[in-house]
Amino acid sequence: MALLALPTDAHVDRLGSFLMALNHHGQGGKGHYDMAIPALASSIRAHHVLVLSLAAVLLLATFVAAICYGSTAIPLQSVIGALTGQPANGNPNFDIVTSIRLPRAITACLAGAALGVAGLQMQTLMRNPLADPFVLGITSGASLGVALVVLASGSAIGAFLSSGLGLGGGFAIVGAATLGGLLVLAPVLAISARLQNPSTVLIFGLMTGYAVSAFVTLLVAGARPDQLERWIAWGFGSFGAVTWTELQVLAPVAGLGLALACLSTKQLNALLLGENYARSMGLNTRAMRLVTMAVASMLAGVVTAFCGPIGFLGVAVPHMARSILKSSDHRVLVPATILLGALTALFAQLVSLLPSQFGVLPLNAVTALIGAPVVVFVILRSRSGVFTG
Amino acid sequence: MKPFLQTRDLAVGYRNRTVLSNINVQVGPGELVCLLGVNGIGKSTLMRTLARMEPALAGSIEIGGADITGMSSYDLARNVAVVLTERVAVRAMPAFRLVELGRYPHINWSGLLSEADRDIVRDAIAAVGAEHLAHRDINELSDGERQRIMTARALAQRPAVLLLDEPAAFLDVAARVEMIATLRTLAREQNVAVILSSHDLELSLRMADTIWLIDGAGHLHIGAPEDLLTDGSIAAAFSGPNVAFSADDRTFKITSHPHGRAFVDGPGAAAGMARTVLEREGFQMVHSPEEADVSVIVTAAGWEATTHSKRDRGTSFAELARFLRLQTEF
């Protein structure tokens, strides 16, 4: 009996708050707490600024490193010289830096940021920590769009990998990839609105993705061996196939998507409480759902069209951002995801160069090696299980 | 004076299935309304319709004289705030940040708060007595504490009407009393109309200004708790074959008496205890030993029970219950 009667911490705590609730209005004084919130808020802000600045500095360093390293290493002075616009003559590496390494590094930054933000949007919209463009089948849908355009236009499958594509063709493929992504995402989200069980939604997304991939494989099966080879190479994922011409499409589309994501942080924050609460606070959830879907499909679609189906960045990067910032606030989470996404993609690009003279590792293998441990960590860390909402 | 809520011939339900109809209610500022009724009778549907989360099937809902059907979602959110039964699962967010989300309908696209917004957030946290929770992470809070923060978030919306769907559902007894006491105080002090649905009959009857009672036939009875207790509608709505709600002591009584009648004598408190033991064992109380199948006399030393054929005594109520169960003659 005596043991049972001993108050636990929780009891004491509750009793305390109970008494506070009853006495509160008589007391009037707010005491230390008036100071506590601003103090905490500013210490949180300081932490966020520190993290974001560090990420930006690291990103800059990695960006330069990604230009230095490649099939041949280029000295730092040479790279900085080319980047700062010094005249080309006298710099033997000028062309490699400006026409190969620089667009590749920019592409990696844009792709990483785009996939990370698309993953963040999906995770918040579905309130599911494992959601990302790849898992939900957006990437497969985008591949379908790409395959259909390429096959229907009668051109070789590999054509869009080479640089002779032209702007019009580029936008057509991006449009098809985005529509393909939406085609898969729409039913997945429709189901997620009706079924409250997140694991069902994930499995539905995965299965839809597999079915669409199978369809793409059937489409591609009739291709010539050399086309098939290039299709498979595209499937490995690469930032290196994008030149300045493709960047003219990739950069504005990805930029638009990222800008829209930055403008919707208020809405994304409201969605943290679930759609019902978000609606009760004045959010038009249906419009938000549509816009977020479209933006995520566009971001994932444009990256898939030019760099191939790249997995794991979308799911891993937002979690890295959350755990480093220790915050779910999208006002800092979106910029952090952009910075960390770019950083991670550049890092993956660097790692894929490790075999040096033996060629490069498939980018997808590298992102999986980085991303899979993050996913496992997320699952293991959540005490109540990731599917409890 | 802040606007208040009024419905005219409101009907609620889903698609073609009307759950409740002809609802005409008015709620004034500072009023605490408890919505009572058995499970599945339509409490949640009514609450959701008042919050425009479901469309009304017929009639109208007005807040401050304006029909909510045509209101923009921001205007509605500035007038009506809700606390739902669903659990929010937010990771890595201090409680005051969650309360800040309540400013949503009042701030611009950037989501940045002005000093005035921060003051409102601080007042909302103070109004629910959650100052000590403000810096804690949402994930670490108990159900009661989280409910308190969700209520503060709703208050930060500065609504005229605060709707709470079973706010006490996951709370233990102490937290439940605490919750409703807080709501009562803030209805008065913030001049908000508070409407909550509840399962806790006794607590609601004690604390509410007005009861909305949905009876088994789907009719809505409206009145002060004492009015509905007096006219018997509460007793009628909550009594079943084996239980009845007694208006006198505002509690449930067991009404099946398979074991006969009993008489209890002794000092007040102890006799009361003995009576509940006898009621639980299936006896009906009578006022004289002559009518009774068993008579129990309680004293400070213990009890003495007499049946037609047996007599026994003991010191604890557990022994009394055991004695009653062993008597096969009943």
Image (tube, coloured by chain):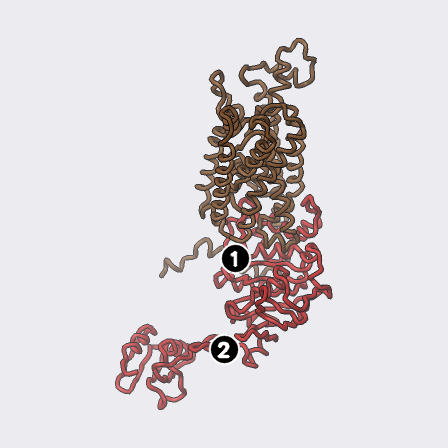
Chain colours: A brown, B red
- Tell me: residue A24, above or below residue A347: below
Amino acid type, callout 2: Asp
Q: Quadrant of the N terminus of chain A?
A: bottom left
Q: Residue at x 66, y 66 (%)?
A: B30
Q: Indicate the chain on which mark 1 is placed.
A: B
Relative vertical location of residue A83 with respect to residue B23 in this rendering, above or below = above
The residue positioned 49% from the left and 77% from the top of the image is B249
Q: Can you give x and y, in whole percent of width and height, for residue A373 in the image?
A: 45, 34
SS label for mark 1: helix
Say if residue A363 shows up in the picture: no
Residues A169 and A27: in front is A169
Same chain for the residues under marks 2 and 1 in the image? yes
Q: Is residue A23 left or right of residue B26?
A: left
Residue B237 vs A108, above or below: the answer is below
Instruction: Tell me the kind of residue under disc 1.
Output: Gly
* Residue A336: image location, x then y, percent: 60, 35
Q: Rounded to the nearest whole Å, what is the CA distance between mark 2 and mark 1?
A: 28 Å
Image-based side of A182 in relation to B108, left or right? left
Residue toward you, B166 or A151: A151
Asked whether B237 or B302 is in front, the reply is B237
The residue under label 2 is B249
Q: Quadrant of residue B49?
A: bottom right
Q: Residue at x 30, y 84 (%)?
A: B306
The x, y position of residue B134, in whole percent, is 58, 50
Q: Which residue is disc 1 drawn over?
A: B144
Characterize the local packing of mark 2: few (<14), some (14-19) or many (20 or more) Cα atoms within 10 angstroms: few
